């Protein structure tokens, strides 16, 4: 059992960590409370971008490693769910983005004629855009191919896992608030609307604007063309726990997106989705020792950038696992 690792959490952070560990020869068991398609990861719009995550000095290298992996995976989008897609990131200067941006040679300031109405500045480039339900299925399949397994199991404490493995990797996301316990973990509520795509092929993101409502409420506007429909967003409401879609918020999201792309007016709504991003002042990737001698590796608190840093954090977690 000395090579066994139990990974707690079956979202993108947990599954990616499990894949890296299993492909390095560890015997990996993922304990997940719910199926991957019911996790917050499955709801993500999933454009590669280091969004709402600290510390910057670590996020840069984590993002760069993940970017390289996603570009490689995009060679087979049907299998992996990863595509490299062109689009616009508004309200964002090119200077100061970090080393990962240098790996995107097409990233540049957009010209005036490339901007939608009401948008004064944007970067134009091609970035990985991930179909998360498909990608999570891919990760589970890749894990099983490497000899790992996924088990449905609710965990009440790390001692349960430590009794069965010398190394435990905590990728419990928002669940870390109670499991660790870590009171610095909090939800950032994101609501989105999936509509029938009228033919939009490029993504668009604007992170500017404030929404009314509770503390830390922020408004984003984005359009992500996915194989299952056009994803419209969104919100970033800190410390909001309600997972029910709000009709007024949904209508406002559609209206903002239609102001940018008039062809969206009257688009048929396919789904309403809400996810709670597991945020923390600083993402936590570190190892501690449990009573009894087992090693516990924390890998949680990635906020809205879990997909963006998943591979970089997974490799760091695997290094810390020994």
Image (spheres, rainbow, N blue to C red):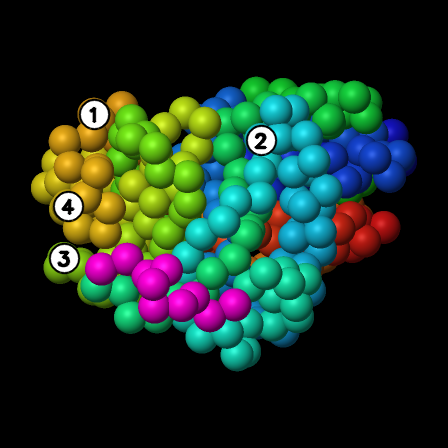
Task: Check disc 3 and report the residue beneath it.
Answer: 213
Hey, which residue is sitting farthest left in the picture? 248
Say whether residue 272 is left or right of residue 297: left
**Circles 1, 4 touching at the beta carbon (< 8 Å):** no
Judged by depth in the image, the label closer to the viewer, 3 or 2, is 2
Q: How crowded is mark 1: few (under 14 residues within 10 Å), some or many (20 or more)?
A: few
Say whether residue 190 is left or right of residue 58: left
Say whether residue 48 is left or right of residue 144: left
Q: Which contiguous range is marked in magenta? A: 108-117
Which of pointers 3 and 2 lies earlier in the amino acid sequence?
A: 2
Judged by depth in the image, the label closer to the viewer, 1 or 3, is 1
Which of pointers 1 and 4 lies earlier in the amino acid sequence?
A: 4
Per the image, label 2 sits on a secondary structure element best described as loop
Where residue 134 sits in the image (x, y, percent)?
55, 26
Which of pointers 2 and 4 lies earlier in the amino acid sequence?
A: 2
Q: Which of 234 and 206 is in front in this view?
A: 206
As drawn, 29 above or below 305: above
Where residue 82 sits in the image (x, y, percent)?
59, 36
Task: Check disc 2 and report the residue beneath it.
Answer: 81
**Circles 3, 4 touching at the beta carbon (< 8 Å):** no
As drawn, 21 above or below 151: below
Task: Check disc 1 and report the residue beneath it.
Answer: 268
As drawn, 267 above or below 258: above
Residues at marks 1 and 4, CA–CA distance in whole angstroms: 13 Å
Say whether residue 148 is left or right of residue 155: right
Judged by depth in the image, the label closer to the viewer, 3 or 4, is 4
Judged by depth in the image, the label closer to the viewer, 1 or 2, is 1
Residue at image location 60% in from the left, 72% down from the top: 98
Q: Residues within 10 Å of mark 4 (few under 14, many from 20)?
A: some
User: Any mark on residue 255, and which?
Assistant: 4
Residues at marks 2 and 4, CA–CA distance in whole angstroms: 28 Å
Which of pointers 1 and 2 lies earlier in the amino acid sequence?
A: 2
């Amino acid at each position: 059992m000395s090579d066994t690792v139990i990974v707690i959490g079956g979202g993108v952070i947990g599954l990616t960590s499990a894949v890296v560990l299993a492909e390095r020869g560890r015997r990996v068991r993922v304990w997940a409370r719910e199926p991957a398609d019911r996790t917050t990861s499955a709801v993500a719009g999933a454009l590669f971008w280091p969004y709402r995550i600290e510390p910057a000095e670590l996020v840069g290298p984590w993002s760069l490693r993940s970017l390289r992996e996603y570009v490689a995976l995009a060679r087979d989008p049907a299998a992996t769910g990863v595509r490299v897609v062109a689009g616009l990131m508004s309200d964002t200067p090119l200077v100061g983005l970090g080393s990962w941006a240098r790996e995107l040679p097409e990233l540049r300031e957009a010209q005036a004629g490339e901007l939608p109405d009401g948008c004064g500045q944007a970067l134009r480039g091609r970035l990985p855009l991930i179909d998360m339900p498909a990608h999570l299925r891919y990760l589970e399949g890749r894990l099983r191919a490497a000899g790992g397994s996924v088990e449905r199991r609710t965990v009440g404490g790390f001692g349960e896992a430590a009794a069965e493995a010398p190394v435990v990797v905590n990728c419990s996301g928002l669940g870390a608030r109670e499991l660790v316990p870590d009171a610095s973990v909090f939800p950032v509520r994101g609501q989105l609307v999936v509509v029938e795509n009228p033919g939009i092929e490029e993504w668009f993101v604007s992170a500017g604007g404030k929404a009314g409502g509770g503390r830390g409420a922020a408004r984003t506007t984005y359009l992500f063309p996915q194989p299952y429909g056009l994803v419209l967003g969104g919100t970033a409401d800190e410390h909001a726990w309600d997972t029910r879609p709000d009709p007024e918020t949904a209508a406002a999201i559609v209206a903002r997106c239609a102001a940018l792309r008039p062809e969206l007016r009257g688009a048929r709504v396919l789904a309403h989705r809400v996810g709670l991003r597991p945020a923390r002042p600083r993402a936590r990737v570190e190892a501690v020792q449990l009573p009894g001698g087992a090693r516990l590796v924390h890998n949680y608190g990635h906020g809205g950038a879990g997909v963006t840093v998943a591979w970089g954090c997974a490799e760091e977690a695997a290094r810390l696992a020994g």
